[in-house]
Structure formats: C-alpha cells, structure tokens
Amino acid sequence: MSELNRRAILQTGVVAAGAALLPRIVSAEELNTSADLRIASFKFDVTPPLGHSLCGGWITPATVIEDSLEAIGFVILGAGEPIVVCAVDWTGLLNEAHIAWRTALAEAAGTSPERVAVQCVHQHDAPFACLEAQRIVSKIGGLPDIVDIDFFNRCLDKGREAVRKAMAETVPLTHVATGQAKVERVASNRRIMGLTGKVVTQRGSSSKDPAHQQFPEGLIDPFLKTVAFYSGETKVVSCHYYACHPMSHYGKGKVSADFCGLARKQIQKTEPNCTHLYFNGCGGNIGAGKYNDGADATRPILMQRVLDAIVQSEANLSPQKIETCRWSTAEMLPPPNTDFSIDQILNQIADSSRKVVDRNRPAYTVAWHRRYEKQLPIVLSALHLNQTSLVHFPAESFIEYQLRTQASFADRFVACAAYGDGGPWYIPTQEAYTQGGYESTVAWCDPKIDQLMCEAVVKAMNS
Ligand SMILES: [Zn+2]
C-alpha cells in the first residue's frame, strides 16, 4: 500500500469518526418525516436496434435480441428537490452522454442533474455511449459507429416520458430496509499478482485456463446488498448491489442483460408489485473468470447464484421508519494520465491498417482529454436514509473504493453502485498503476484520481 493510499484511508476514517462525535447541523429541508416523502418507480426499454454497435463497435454488432435491455429507476419527492436514481443495462455512459441522461431525467422530474444518479450495469453485448468518441470516429470515417445518435435520443425521450409518468404516480415512502447475503462462486479478482508484486496473469470474465480456476478469488466483496423502500407495509422498490463484471459470455452479437440482469428479471417476475433494480458495485477489477468457462450453459448457473443471493438478502428485511432522507454530492475532476499523447492517439485512430478496437477505443481517451479541457467535473452522489447510504461512484471503479468506503463508515449500511459517469474508464487504485495488468492501460486519468475519489467520497458521506 502506498503512503498516499494509507493517508487517504486514514483521512477517510478520521473524518468519519470526527463526524460521529460532532453534532451535525441538519437543515429543515434535509430532515423529513416519512409523512413528507413520496416514491414512484419507472422503467423503459433501451434495447438497441439490430445492427447497432455493441461495446463501442469492436465486437459483433447486434444480430439477435436474446432478451431486452432496460433502464429502471425511482424518484423520491419530499427531501428537497426531487431525487432520481436509475440503473441502465448498457456497457457505459460517458462524459456528455452521461450528462445528457441525467439532464433529461432531471427535466422530467423538475430537478437539477446533480440530483440524478444514472449507473450502468456494464453488460458488453450492449451500447457503450460517448458522444465525443462518436464524433471522432464519424469524422475519420470507415469505422463502426460508437452509438447511433437517433437511437440515443429516442432513449432519452422514453426516459423523460417514463419519469413524467412516475411523477404522477407517487405513493408515500415510509420505511427502508436493508439486507445482505454472500454470493457463492461468482466474483473473482481479475488481477492475479505474482511474487514480484506485479500482475502475472489477467483473469477475464470467462476463462478455460486451469490456472485461472486454481488461483484464489483474491480481493472481492462477496456480499450482495439490498436496500428496499416501503409504502406502509408494501415493498415498492428493491435495489440490489453486487460488484462483478456481469458478462458470462459476449461478442457474438447476442444482446442480453446477461446473468445479473437475468437474475433481476427473474425476481421481478415473482414480485410484480415491487420494482427491482440491480446495480453493479465497484467491480472494475472483478469478474466471474474463476467460475465461468464462458459456455452458454454457464450463464443460467451464474444467474441462479446471483438470484439465490437476492432471495436470501431479501429474506430478512426488517423495515424501519424513515426519519431522515438527504441527497449529497461531491464533484471531482481528475486530470488525464500524461502517458497518453493525444496527437499520437489521433494518428492511431486514423490508421486504417489497425484493428477497430485499437481505433474506436482510443477515441474515448481523446474524449476524456477534451472533457477535462472543458473542466466539466464528475458528480459523485449519495442518498442517505437513516443509517443507510447508497453511494454512486463513477466509471469502472476498483473494488478497493467500495471496501474502503464501507470500512470507513462502518456505522452505516453502505451500498455502492459504480459505472456512473464512465469518462475516466478504469479507476484503479494509485498502487495498481505500478502493478501492470490490463486496467491501468485503459485508465484515462492520472493516478491522483485515487486521492480525489477518496476526498469526494468523504464529502458525499458527510455533507
Ligand atoms: Zn469493464
């Protein structure tokens, strides 16, 4: 562990402990009795049309829709301006695309984009939207689209309509409950460390390499967490959180919500009157590779393991009256990683002798640089109800951020959703940058993102 990380964790812990000792001034707007609060859920289809690019255009485009992709969310009224939280079955929403989603849902709810969290589940046979990257590849020509803009805009229209409808259908929000259960034999750390402290082999989402199955799981968060919202005795919304890349297999053009999304769809069938949401936690360095050979037959097995945890996590929910409900945010603007030369990358994108992945993917690097030049910060947000906090992280955050946050605020039930604004792509820890492995080669930000993220978490948890 680097000294900087040690300090960041220490700082997180100290601030948390300090906050517990000092009386915090709570404004009238923040402190709400459950009688003031209202909730409604919404859902809209975001399945791409056949032929649409998947995962940025460097894998087979959509050739068949195996099952639909959905955006599912809820609005909360009565805790200041409306709050909107939404989970999307897409690979990612980056930079302007993420801001456009938050703005559209905010407009429909009559609130500001800062009070909207949009988190992707990160399936790979799904759209991976970055509007600037799309402009770059379309200008160069001869490359598959990143995202079809008309389709993207149609999704925003559907989102506005769904949120508007939800605003007219709210019910009193009175209670909140939490649960958790271990997910057996799904998550494993993708970065297998050797004796020299470097990544010796990268364990992907699936693997047939016996070594990948033999190496231990490594650092993961084995728990699936649930936060459920009630109107009186009726459970109306249930959110599930688990940190792991959600792909059992991908790349053949078969659009699917994959094993995590399928688990959510399954529990939804059994409880039609409660809306279930699934969030991917800080799973940037987590995948199912230890337990997944990538065969078609393994998808339902992984689905069942996640579903079992959801059922078990929900089994002991004990609703508590909501005494407080507040939304907090913290902005961060991590500088780009100076290892990347934008001129060189633009030449690479223009080089038609290269593979699509080596041209479309770097367009996202350029997009982050241009976004940084515009000084458009990332918003990290948190929804706090009594002693429960739902924290919304950006991009492909490493599991360490989730574990640090939970450990530093051990007096709270902390549920983490990542894959918010995907601009930075991977968010490794500072020390991971020096350990090698795939993720640090596609991390668009400078290693100081570690410290900036820890500071943003402390602010969002305490403000
Ligand atoms: Zn990923």
Image (tube, rainbow, N blue to C red):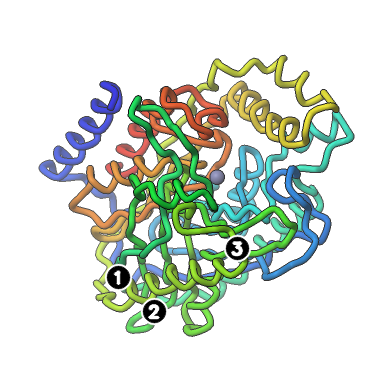
Q: Are marks 2 and 1 in contact (CB under 8 Å)?
A: yes
Q: Amino acid at mark 1?
A: Ala
Q: Position of residue 285 (x, y in %)?
A: 45, 42
Q: At label 2, which amino acid type do we have?
A: Lys
Q: Mark 3 or 1 closer to N-term?
A: 1
Q: 46 and 209: which one is in front?
A: 209
Distance of mark 3 from mark 1, alpha carbons? 37 Å
Which residue does the image show at 43% across and 52% down from the upper left?
Answer: 213
Element type at marker 3?
loop
Q: Residue furthest left?
A: 21
Residue at image location 38% in from the left, 76% down from the top = 311
Task: State whether residue 243 is above or below residue 43.
Answer: above
Q: Position of residue 456 (x, y in %)?
A: 37, 35
Label 1 belongs to which residue?
A: 177
- Name the quadrant where ligand 1 sits: top right
Q: Nearer the viewer, residue 349 or 97?
A: 349
What residue type is disc 3 on?
A: Ala
* Nearer to me, 371 or 138: 138
Q: Residues within 10 Å of mark 3 (few under 14, many from 20)?
A: few
Q: Look at the numbered discs 3 and 2 and tell me whether their residues touch, using CB distance below 8 Å.
A: no
Q: Which mark is residue 294?
A: none
Task: Say left or right for 77 vs 165.
Answer: left
Mark 3 or mark 2: name the one nearer the start of the chain.
2
Instruction: Specify the quadrant of the image occupied by residue 398.
Output: top left
CA gap between label 2 and label 1 equals 9 Å
Q: Which residue is mark 2?
A: 235
Determine which residue is flagged by label 3: 295
